[in-house]
Amino acid sequence: MTTTTRDTVNGLDSSDPLAHYRDRFLLPPGTLYFDGNSLGPLPKETVQRMQDVIASEWGAGLIASWLEADWINAPLRVGNKIAGLIGAGEGEVIVADSTSINLFKTLDAALKLNPGRTTILSEAGNFPTDLYMAEGLASLVRDRANLAVVDPDEVLTALDENVAVLMLTQVHYKTGFIHDMKAITEQAHAAGALVIWDLSHSAGSIPLDLNGCDVDFAVGCGYKFLNGGPGAPAFLFAAQKHLPQCRPVLSGWFGHKDQFAFADSYTPTGDIRQFLCGTTPILGISALETGVDIFCEVDMASVRNKAIELGKLFIRLLKESHFEQYGFKLVSPEDSRHRGGHISIAHENGYAIMQAIKDRGLVGDFRSPDVLRFGITPLYQRFADVYDAAGVIREVMETAAWDREEYKQRSLVT
Ligand SMILES: *Cc1c(COP(=O)(O)O)cnc(C)c1O
């Protein structure tokens, strides 16, 4: 195998059309950040924007800012911007709550749209909160819903006449495997089920075409690839054709047809705003908007192309350093077409290895029981960063630097 050199990767960086976006982010010096799939870094504009929101809109404008700073339309405005990134139309995406809560809202909406059927179908190994929220909803509505969790390769055959809704995460949080959204949605529909796609590891990472795939509902995260900040509000997509029939379970006043009439009973707006519940966290949505605005400048196809090249380079460098001889296994699909925005490798001492790696300035994360995850985020990652990251992993393995008691103590967040 020919060895990749630093000159080769520097050449890739100097011809990279996205290279200048790196300067839009505050990245701590000396850190190789490979965890933007878990918490995106801080865009420089967000610092200025937050100062304005706090000092000027909140501090000086006070309550008048609901209109003067257009806070009232922020969930729909930012939702429409996200719609552009995921192949949704105007008025089909709203920013609200957390991904977990949005799953609850869409699961209930889908069940109501498919009366007579009661099964929520999902796959084993799906992101925990997706399954937990479905469990919680099923325990609440009892005979109206039950959760069926089957092995990933049995999902399609489990689509029987009782499945009301199929809930899947498009890009798997652990392996990075990408589900075929179009084919699966088609098969679910053919079996009479609706679909909910969790886009937490898709939005801002891969090009999406929700309407082209005829998706019913989707949810996703604001703080991962979209760089909206810790705990940023999430988003919810509902296909236009479903909106007039939806009656939201979390029927809060922000989803009321005439919010300021203060009526005693609830009438939904009939549009995407009915999926709002209570007051939007304006500080959070303002930070999210600046993160999303950067994506509105770029073409998702070029983001994806660079992500594929970064990922291929990472895997090539791991192979060149004979990572399998050190006991690693590639967990992510090797075929780039099936791999989303992170590279996962497994090792029985994965936890300690990740701690040693972090100590050397390379930030990835660990997912139980043995997965080391490295996020691929083309807007601020350089080919040289991938080169250096592979160098850190090699050094930690060659010197067995990970084999220390302090690296084996589990912390609260991994
Ligand atoms: C990160 C993530 C979530 C997060 O849910 P929150 O309610 O925002 O904490 C949900 N689903 C998937 C697939 C995720 O990766």
Image: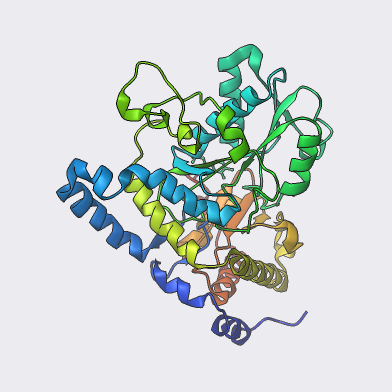
Of 237 and 179, nearer the camera is: 237
Q: Residue at x 72, y 20 (%)?
A: 117
Query: Considering only vertical position in the picture, is 396 above or below 412?
Result: below
Q: Residue at x 42, y 53 (%)?
A: 228
Relative depth, front residue between 385 and 277 = 277
Answer with the quarter of the image where residue 330 lies: bottom right
| Above or below, 305 relative to 90 | below
Spot occupied by residue 164 in the image (x, y as percentages of width and height): 71, 26
- Is residue 365 visible in the rendered structure shown here? yes
**For the N terminus, which image quadrant?**
bottom right
Residue occupying image coordinates x 63% and y 54%: 208
Q: Which residue sits furthest left?
A: 60
Q: Position of residue 295 (x, y in %)?
A: 49, 62
Q: Is residue 134 left or right of residue 32?
A: right
276 horizontally vs 236: left or right: left
- Looking at the image, is 118 positioned above or below residue 193? above
* Number of disc labels: 0
